[in-house]
Amino acid sequence: MGDSEEPWEYDGRYYTVTGFSDVDCRDGYGWELEDVAPLPNRGLVLEAFLDGTSLGFTFRAFTDQPLPLALVHRFVTEAANGIPRAT
């Protein structure tokens, strides 16, 4: 996945997933989950990050709004399986 082609729809809201790499502040790969519709969009709501040095996964939430459990579960599961690991 990484960069979702079709938005994920949960409870009438739409979310997109974008993959990224970070070598400036952290060394690793991650995914961001953004709430994009309907207006007003809520922007970045979750982040998954795989540290390239320690190989540890971290997850962060950037919202004070409730998120559907099914959405969080899908994001965590797909990120854990989809973020590239160093070999």
Image: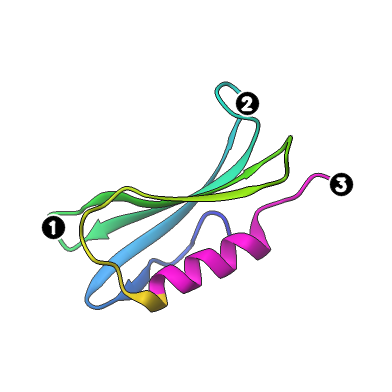
Q: Is residue 9 above or below residue 16?
A: below
Q: Which residue is mark 3?
A: 87
Pointer 1 or 2: first along the chain: 2
Q: Give the labeled residue for mark 1.
A: 39
Image coordinates of residue 5 in percent, x first then y, are 48, 62
Q: Nearer the viewer, residue 60 or 10?
A: 60
Label 1 amino acid?
Answer: Leu
Residue 86's x, y, as percent?
80, 44
Crowding near the residue tagged with mark 1, few <14, some 14–19, many ≥20 C-alpha atoms within 10 Å: few
Between 66 and 79, the residue placed more toward the observer is: 66
Label 2 amino acid? Answer: Val
Q: Quadrant of residue 17?
A: bottom left
Residue 50 percent location from the top left of the image: 63, 46
Give the numbered dot on residue 23.
2
Please tell me whether mark 1 or mark 2 is closer to you in this view.
2
Q: Which residues are magenta?
A: 71-86
Left or right of 57 in this view: 34:
left
Gap between marks 3 and 2, in whole Å?
17 Å
Across and down, in percent, residue 58 comes to 55, 49
Q: CA distance from mark 1 to mark 2?
A: 33 Å
Could you tell me which secondary element the residue under label 1 belongs to?
Answer: loop
Task: Name the image quarter holding the N terminus.
Answer: bottom right
Q: Earlier in the sequence, mark 3 or mark 2?
A: 2
Whether tag 3 and tag 2 are in contact, CB under 8 A, the answer is: no
